[in-house]
Image: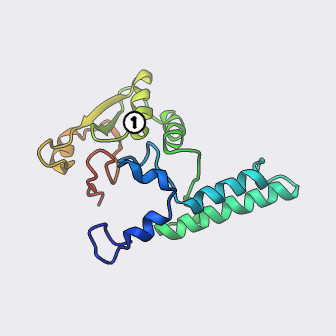
Amino acid sequence: MPPATDPSLDLDFVRGLYPDPCWNWAFFENAGGSYVPESVIIRVADYMRETQVQPGANYQASAKAAERIANGQRLMAELIGAAADEVIIGPSTTMNVFVLAKALGGMFTPGDEIIVTNLDHEANIGAWRGLAGDGMGIREWPVNAETGNLEIETLDGLLGDRTRLVCFSHCSNIVGRINDAK
């Protein structure tokens, strides 16, 4: 999709995809919650009406639920250029990162370090900060207050022998900056 400043982006068309009330305010959120297009609302309602069951069991609604989930994973994988088995669909970013942090937490030893930023949404830092109670060191990669950038030179000074993980968002919901993740 072209950027919002691109004249080929039909803003009226995009706005028409969403419920009317969402255009009364500017919402600068991503992980925190966002309005979704009407087509998403319809698909979620259909899923809940027809297949709100445990997927993978041996009855029709369960098989259909599993098929819908697999199709969603396949489509997301296609969108981001990944394999379908590399995509996990969960209830929210916050919950998914929490589960990941709990799973990885057992692989770390007291004194190991995780680097988080002061620019990220709580969904990406809260779970990692929670590991501090298990003896993990949490270091903060500060944003450059003048530019809004996470600067690699600052990160270089934080990396150490005990650094096990660096967590940062590719695009900040606070300043809207796309961070260089290469």
Quadrant containing the N terminus in the rendered view: bottom left
Indicate the secondary structure of the residue bearing disc 1: helix
- For disc 1, the marked residue is 122
Q: Which residue occupies the extreme bottom position in the image?
A: 8
Q: Residues within 10 Å of mark 1 (few under 14, many from 20)?
A: some
The amino acid marked with disc number 1 is Glu
Q: In the figure, is residue 105 to the left or right of 3?
A: right
Q: In the figure, is residue 40 to the left or right of 93?
A: right
At x 11%, y 45%, the residue is 146
Quadrant containing the C terminus in the rendered view: bottom left
Q: In the figure, is residue 5 to the left or right of 93?
A: left
Could you say which is closer to the camera, residue 79 or residue 162?
79
Could you say which is closer to the camera, residue 138 or residue 13?
13
Residue 97 position within the rendered picture, expressed as x and y whole percent measured from the top left: 49, 41
At x 19%, y 45%, the residue is 156
Q: Which residue occupies the extreme left position in the image?
A: 146
